[in-house]
Image (cartoon, grey):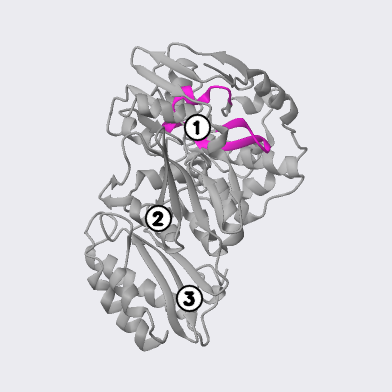
Amino acid sequence: MQFLLNNEIVRVSDVEPTKSVLSYLREDRFLTGTKEGCAEGDCGACTVVIAELESEGLSLKSVNACIQFVPTLHGKAVFTVEFLRRQNNGNLHPVQQAMVDKHGSQCGFCTPGFIMSLWCLYNEHQEAKTIPIRSDVRSALTGNLCRCTGYKPILQAADAMFEVAPVTFDNDGLRDKLLALKTESPSTYSHTEGQLHSPTTTAELLQLRADHPEATLLAGGTDVGLWVNKQFRTLSSIIYLGDIPELKSITQNDQYINIAAGVTLSNAYKALAKHYPEMNQMWERFASRPIRNVGTLGGNIANGSPIGDSMPALIAIATRVVLSSVRGQRELLLEDLYLDYMKKDMAADEVVTLIKIPLPLADQAFRCYKLSKRYDSDISAVFTGMAITLDNDLVSDVKIAFGGMAATPKRASHTEQFLLGKSWDEATAKQAMTILKQDYSPMTDMRASDQNRMQSAMNLLYRFYLETRPVNPLTKEMTDVFGEV
């Protein structure tokens, strides 16, 4: 395999398929600016920037090096903090200088990760000839944790990095180098520790899946990377989906937004938010930007975690999924994919290839809510998606789905049945809150107790009523936690 490392071609043939990019950088290349903090994509100390060619052109994105496998870099470029001074003729890059001037570093362990996230933001806005607003900066840094300095001087550095002479990144030169590395043929990277297959078409993927049903499917690695780092699993056979252009497409017809399974969460929610602005907060609070930059909507759905944020919201708007194999395709409602805890209605040779999200209905009200201990970059204790349609103030259709309340993402069937045909008023909402107890028996774990989850779910249903009631509904500004800022 070959890729660009700090703008220079690197060829690798002796690295195990599950070796992390972080370990490779530190142990094999002695690029020790990239740090290991958590080894699970949570703290951002290992942040690097990866560049690749996509259909719309060159894409630069911040990622967590600790949960990316080295073979997935084939044909791409990776940049570490060591590159920045080289880019600026040996001088500190404006991002680095701003961190020094604004005292944005104390112990310094997290600093390279912050700098790489800011460098990615810097290049993005240099290319667009714009200056980011504070919310853009906050979003770019959601994946970076600091334990000693505090964030104010780091945010000040983000402002200051645009106040000095700019350092321009050579996008055209990098694009030419990546085009020279591009290969169209499928490849298998072999090592004594195992194999990683990289198909380039869906047909090749399905044939590989039929030939290797025991293989691990790898998309963004945001979950699989933890299997290796935290559970010490041995993955002897991997099929990597990241080199298949067909699985990165987003199309639309008069009924559905069609998102292929390999589309990143960042791109998927960007497309969905155009039609469902109610998903904006979910988009921003789904993990962190480095996770969303590589994690895929198809992977999140196929993984089927009961606390996955995507599924309740998508179930509430009647999303459908397409499963493919060499035997053909079949389509089912997303809610029907999940049978039990981490058990799905999928044959061993089937792969999720497409997610079909219905376009919004004109008379439908939709909301999704997330509750977690930490606002940014945290796993939900409870997540819900709710959609309701009224006919003369009577409930003609309703879908309510929760995550974190059962072994799978699950609809509140008893509550829905009760609501149909009822007047959407205070008394109905209060009764529905009580009936919700018939639909769920949540568990107690580190994120919340069973009583907390149940009460939270009931409160969220009431909030949904307050925001969608026919008379004097609460506006977004009235319920926004940041509304006074």
For residue 278, above or below residue 125: below
- Percent across and percent down for residue 116 are 57, 36
- Percent across and percent down for residue 7 are 64, 21
Three-letter code for the amino acid on which mark 3 is drawn = Thr
The stretch of residues the image draws in magenta is 49-76
Q: Mark 2 and mark 3 in contact (Cβ < 8 Å)?
A: no
Q: Which residue is disc 1 drawn over?
A: 202
Q: Earlier in the sequence, mark 3 or mark 2?
A: 2
Q: Is residue 337 magenta?
A: no
Q: Nearer the viewer, mark 3 or mark 2?
A: 2
Q: Which residue is disc 2 drawn over?
A: 333
Three-letter code for the amino acid on which mark 1 is drawn = Thr
For residue 422, above or below residue 463: below
Q: Secondary structure at mark 3?
A: strand
Crowding at dot 3, Cα within 10 Å, few <14 / some 14-19 / many 20+, comes out as many
Return the residue found at the far front. 327
Front position in the image: 316 or 207: 207
Q: Nearer the viewer, mark 3 or mark 1?
A: 1
Q: Secondary structure at mark 1?
A: helix
The quadrant in which the C terminus is found is bottom right
Looking at the rendered structure, which numbered label has been put on residue 389?
A: 3
Three-letter code for the amino acid on which mark 2 is drawn = Leu
Residue 153 appears anywhere in the view: no
- Percent across and percent down for residue 400 are 38, 68
Distance between mark 1 and mark 2 Cα atoms: 22 Å
